[in-house]
Image (cartoon, rainbow, N blue to C red):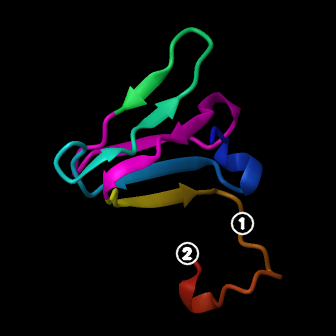
């Protein structure tokens, strides 16, 4: 389902994925698509590929359903916003 990461978590500024498996060898489907009025961009997952993009409106995207195997990726989100003092995150895990 197409989405924008920042809509879910307003503090997200940058999103990233590090692929851990190969499309076609480890799984089928699971391609990442960025939607653009001029032309969509499709990312074919390959182990070791790092994809980074702004978390806001320019980055409407979706992940295709995996039809065979398992797609593994390390997902990351980054912010420059100061930590919320009311957050349940303890100081040992704060950056």
- Residue in the foreground of this view, choosing between 31 and 11: 31
For label 2, the crowd category at 10 Å Cα-Cα, with few meaning under 14, some 14 to 19 and many 20 or more, is: few
Whether tag 2 and tag 1 are in contact, CB under 8 A, the answer is: no
Provide the secondary structure element on which disc 2 rests. Answer: loop
- Residue in the foreground of this view, choosing between 94 and 15: 15
Tell which residue pokes out farthest to the front in this image.
67
Horizontal relation, residue 57 to residue 16: left or right = right
Cα gap from disc 2 to disc 1, whole angstroms: 10 Å
Q: Which residue is label 1 attached to?
A: 82
Q: Which residue is label 2 attached to?
A: 95
Residue 43 screen position, x and y as percent: 37, 33
Residue 90 screen position, x and y as percent: 65, 90
Residue 11 screen position, x and y as percent: 72, 56
Horizontal relation, residue 23 to residue 91: left or right = left
Tell which residue pokes out farthest to the right in this image.
86
The part of the chain drawn in magenta is 44-69
Tell which residue pokes out farthest to the left in this image.
25
Quadrant for the N terminus in the image: top right
User: Which residue lies at the image location 68% right of the left edge and 39% below the top edge?
Assistant: 56
Q: Is residue 28 above or below residue 75?
A: above
User: Which residue lies at the image location 55% right of the left edge and 39% below the top edge?
Assistant: 62
User: Which residue lies at the image location 70% right of the left edge and 59% below the top edge?
Assistant: 81
**Of the image marks 2 and 1, the number of the one nearer the N terminus:** 1
């Amino acid at each position: 389902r197409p989405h924008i990461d920042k809509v879910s978590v307003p503090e997200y500024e940058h999103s990233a994925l590090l692929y851990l498996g190969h499309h076609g060898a480890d799984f089928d489907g699971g391609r990442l698509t960025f939607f653009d009025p001029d032309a969509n961009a499709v990312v074919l997952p390959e182990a070791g590929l790092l994809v980074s993009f702004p978390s806001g409106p320019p980055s409407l995207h979706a992940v295709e359903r995996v039809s065979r195997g398992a797609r593994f990726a390390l997902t990351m989100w980054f912010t420059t916003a100061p930590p919320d003092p009311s957050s349940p995150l303890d100081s040992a895990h704060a950056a």
